[in-house]
Amino acid sequence: MTSLNKFLSPFIFLFLLFNSLLFSFKGYLANWGLQFEMLLVSNFLFFIISLILFFIQKKALKNSNPNVFVRSIMGGMLLKMFVCSIAVAIYVIVFKDSFSKNSILLSMFLYLIYLGVEVVVATKLNKQQNV
């Protein structure tokens, strides 16, 4: 396994795991007050943002100034938070009275999971770069 695949595999695994859970429980989601399509879109959004931030952080590690890597981590979290806030605002505006608060809460939980995976991967990437 190449080093790039080693670092990208947690993101891919999380994306596929959550999608498979969504498709497996698709019939039950409405009973729990969740919107299937919104959860699929949020999972895809978090996956794409995580991949983009991974490549930004990987590039930041090549810089001789260690502050660049720290700024890329902090900026990435800020960027992800802003994108999530904008996505939730768009979702609420588009669906007005029929939006699902439970779907938003589950998406925010998924945000935390992707954030945790991102921190673990960035830490491993930093350790490998410093060796």
Image: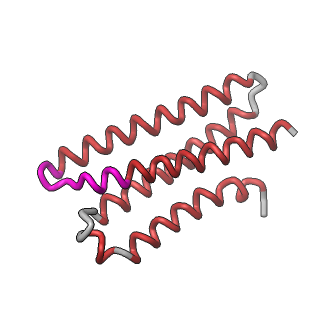
* Residue at figure coordinates x 76%, y 33% from the top left: 62
Q: Residue furthest front?
A: 32
Q: On the image, which quarter does residue 55 sit in? A: top right
Taking 72 as reference, is 106 above or below it? below
Residue 129 position, x and y percent, is: 81, 39
Most common SS among magenta residues: helix
Residue 32 position, x and y percent, is: 27, 66
**Colour scheme of the picture:** secondary structure
Q: On the image, which quarter does residue 44 sit in? A: bottom left
Taking 88 as reference, is 36 above or below it? below
* Residue at figure coordinates x 36%, y 57% from the top left: 41
Q: What stretch is highlighted in magenta?
A: 95-106
Quarter of the image for the C terminus: give it. Answer: top right
- Please give the count of numbered marks on the rendered protein: 0
Residue 33 position, x and y percent, is: 24, 63
Q: Residue furthest right?
A: 131
- The answer to if 82 sits in the magenta stretch is no
- The answer to if 100 sits in the magenta stretch is yes
In the rendered view, does 60 fall on the left or right side of 12? right
In the rendered view, does 25 fall on the left or right side of 76? left
Residue 118 position, x and y percent, is: 60, 46
Quarter of the image for the N terminus: give it. Answer: bottom right
Taking 127 as reference, is 38 above or below it? below
Taking 34 as reference, is 25 above or below it? below
* Residue at figure coordinates x 59%, y 64% from the top left: 13
